Amino acid sequence: LDANPDRSVAFYSQDMNQGMQERMRIESGLRQALGNGELTLYYQPKFEIGSDRLVGAEALVRWVHPTRGLVPPGEFIPLAESTGLIVQVGEWVLEQACAQAAIWQRAGVPPFRLAVNVSAREFTQSLPIRVADTLARYHLDPSWLELEITESTLMHDFERVTAIMDRITELGVALSLDDFGTGYSSLSYLKRFPIHTLKIDRSFTTGIPADQSDCAIAGTIISMARQLGLRVIAEGVETVDQLAFLREAGCDEVQGYLYAKPLPAFEFEQGMRENWLL
Ligand code: C2E
Ligand code: CA
Ligand code: CA
Ligand code: CA
């Protein structure tokens, strides 16, 4: 028992205050960052297992903070999601990703899908309109674009979510289900939603091959995806043992440090020129 309850209350509210101040500091900093052009995109390649061809890339946002340096998304995306600022961040990310893809398209790079992460809060009726408008403005072929959504997006109003997904896929833009296996969506969703690719979450990839349950989960996701006619990619692949297991299990694609970390555009282009099979 706390002998001095008043003191613990005082500490508690002080902690809460500090937490809130920190959040407000990050929020106003992020608002400024959007205006000042402090956000940037890194690109991580995705490869087809077997052929080792570059088949896609994921755009991952970074905040180049004037004093703190490169701030990873884990430190501001969750906050942006809870404050609603994610909508503006997402708008910037889609714009920037399409601008970059259009540069590659014009340069004659063999097309691959550039995936953009989309939070549940961004998944509204206006999203397909914004996607169509952005593709049109950059004269970007829709086969260059993919949206990665998570199971939490699917948990909302079924009719509404399906209508939005249908409109996006009608544009020719692919949808993938990110962090698959970590959420609570029922498997029947997979049949009902127009999803092209399942992304096995890194938490399962990490345990391969030592952890039997992780191997079983990854193997099950892969065989289920194949039976449903979906493509499947494993994220967070760091070792050749993981790659060997995934290849054996029939996984289509891989992404991870074994091949490349997320890279700034110029380094990604260097990879395309010098190292990767296009
Ligand atoms: P995510 O979508 O699951 O992205 C994969 C994360 O795993 C990235 O972290 C990536 O750098 C990291 N990763 C990739 N390969 C490996 C590997 O082999 N080993 C390890 N240890 N990590 C690997 P990152 O860039 O820090 O992004 C974290 C999360 O932030 C993302 O998770 C995503 O949920 C969110 N995020 C990033 N950019 C955006 C964005 O533009 N919009 C939204 N809404 N969310 C974003
Ligand atoms: Ca993702
Ligand atoms: Ca993921
Ligand atoms: Ca993940």
Image (spheres, grey):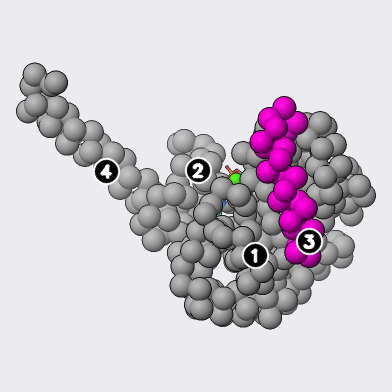
Q: Which residue is mark 1?
A: 190
Q: Say whether marks 2 and 1 touch (CB < 8 Å).
A: no
Lower position in the chain sequence, tag 4 or tag 2: 4
Q: Amino acid at mark 3?
A: Gln
Q: CA distance from mark 2 to mark 3?
A: 34 Å
Mark 1 surroundings: few (<14), some (14-19) or many (≥20) residues within 10 A? some
Q: Amino acid at mark 1?
A: Leu
Write down the region rendered in magenta.
208-234
Residue 203 falls in image quadrant: top right
Q: CA distance from mark 4 to mark 3?
A: 48 Å
Q: Which residue is mark 4?
A: 20
Residue 155 visible:
yes
- Is 225 in the magenta? yes
Q: Amino acid at mark 4?
A: Met
- The disc at residue 239 is none
Question: In this orientation, which residue lies closer to the viewer: 269 or 217?
Answer: 217
Lower position in the chain sequence, tag 2 or tag 3: 2
Q: Is residue 227 left or right of residue 74?
A: right
Mark 3 surroundings: few (<14), some (14-19) or many (≥20) residues within 10 A? few
Lower position in the chain sequence, tag 1 or tag 3: 1
Q: Which residue is mark 2?
A: 74
- Mark 1 element type: helix
| Residue shown at the point (41%, 59%) measured from the top left | 85
| On-image quarter of the N terminus | top left
Q: Amino acid at mark 2?
A: Gly
